[in-house]
Amino acid sequence: MPAPEVPPPRLDLRSGPQRVFAHLLVSNAVVSVINYTVWFAVTFWVFLETRSVFATGMIAGIFVVATAATGIWFGSLVDNHHKRSVMQTSALVSAGIYGVCLAVYLLTPASAFSDVASWQLWVFVVLCMAGVVAGNPRGIALPTLVTLLVPADLRDRANGLVGTVTGTSMLVTSVISGVLVASGGMLHVLLLALVVLAASVLHLAGVRVPETRVVPTGGTGADAAPVGGVDLRGTWRLVRGVPGLVPLIAFSCFNNLIGGGFMALMDAYGLSLVSVQVWGLLWGGLSAVMIVGGLLVARVGLGSRPVRLLLLVNVVSWTVTVLFPLAHSVVTLTVAMVVFMLLMPFAEAAEQTVLQRVVPYERQGRVFGFAQSVEQSAAPVTAFLVGPITQFLVVPFMTDGAGAAAIGGWFGTGQTRAIALVFVVTGLVGLAATLLALVSPQYRALAASYARAATTVDVTADVTADVTADPTGGEAGDQLPLHTGDARP
């Protein structure tokens, strides 16, 4: 007789440590929404005030530079302190900075914000982006909490939910940002941010995370680093010691290198096609697609070859990136974004699952922070350069220059079509790089490294869990060990 079919494992977010994870996931979702709302809103608002593509490119550049510069340090904070404390402090710091932003906004003459060369404008922008970046430690802490709270054979599904929340936060905020900017500029945005962050701090104060101790990661002897220090040497030694981990981070770094152009130009492109309200509502509608993608990951997982899946997702994403700008239409843009948003949770979950499998729990914050810093460090190159290059070279080239004469008859001319040309070129570069990666020996080595890690490495939090009957503040229950990893890929 055939063996009875074993049902696939499922997440249980109603009880135990996984319920704690659900509370943390909701908390991160709310805070991410409000932080990304500030980011999107200040980008929309600056473009509408100045009509400068250069300015939107600079805002994107400020974000990625700050993220790259702080990732390793934020990861060290996550490793050397209780995760909930890091998350609470992050929200409080963001709230304090937004309070300063509100004061600057109210005290600055409105005319100063319409001049792209105004120092008051850029002081305000930098402060707003500092508040957004102060929320980044939460994004580093959450994947480590997946390791702490979720069994090894369910982490890919939990990572799907994390990717969904992260991506959906960025999308839903477009709706909120568009409506708020249209109704009251940045005033309503900052007031809402202060209220939401205060509520999130109160909510998380009642959630008991079963983390009884923090494992110092500063090393010993000559390599020792103070608790809370960066310990870059030890982190780099660990990253190099995991076969295939450096190529994985390098591939994501290259993707961000060419993806920085989209950060700098996408809003300007969309706002040239539709109004700010429609643009915000469009991105809000796309959030439903992101949710579907994340739920698919949570239900079916990633399979035994997440590295291959990551590359295939990139092939599809870059292909649609090449195709959608060929027509001057919000319809083709929408179709392309539907495909991209459906696949994004698979790519995000794949990278997180690999790191959680091969990196010891007590080092995961630093490795996640290191990966974030290295991957984001490439994006400023294009984020800072693509805006000025597009504004001062590509736009004239496609308005009355050689490009307009050569392809303007069928491709179109002017600023919007210049941005479209930049998208096509960067998409072709990304597609070529991904196809080369699929046939490279580095890919085969990385896939083999993950397969070995899946059968030989037990990535487990070396702590005990204080499992509570009520994770929002009930009495402590029995001391139970955390779930351990297993041999399943």
Image (spheres, grey):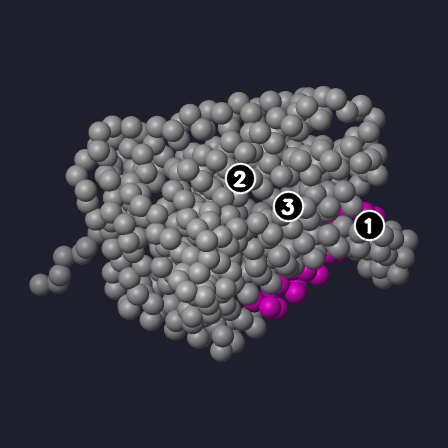
First along the sequence among labels 2 and 3: 3
The residue drawn where x is 56% and y is 55% is 373
Q: Hey, which residue is sitting farthest bottom in the picture?
A: 441
Residue 111: percent from the left, percent from the top?
A: 83, 26
Q: Nearer the viewer, mark 1 or mark 2?
A: 2
Q: Which residue is mark 3?
A: 63
**Amino acid type at mark 2:** Gly
Residue at far right of view: 400
The x and y percentages for residue 256 are 60, 57
In the depicted view, which residue is nearer to us: 271 or 382?
382
Q: Residue furthest left?
A: 1
Indicate whether 214 appears above or below 358. Answer: above
Quick one: label 3, few (<14), some, or many (20+) residues within 10 Å? many
Looking at the rendered structure, the secondary structure element under dot 2 is loop
Q: Is residue 340 above or below residue 437?
A: above
| Magenta stretch, residue numbers | 413-434
Q: Amino acid type of disc 3?
A: Phe
Up the image or down, 481 lies above or below 305; here it is: above
The front one of 140 and 418 is: 140
Mark 1 and mark 2 lie on one chain; the one further toward the N terminus is 2
Element under disc 3:
helix
Q: Is residue 381 magenta?
A: no
Residue at label 1?
391
Name the amino acid, label 1: Gln
How far apart are the alpha carbons under marks 1 and 2? 31 Å
Disc marking residue 135: 2
Q: Earlier in the sequence, mark 1 or mark 3?
A: 3
| Left or right, residue 183 beside residue 463 | right
At 68% from the left and 46% from the top, the residue drawn is: 62
SS assignment at label 1: helix
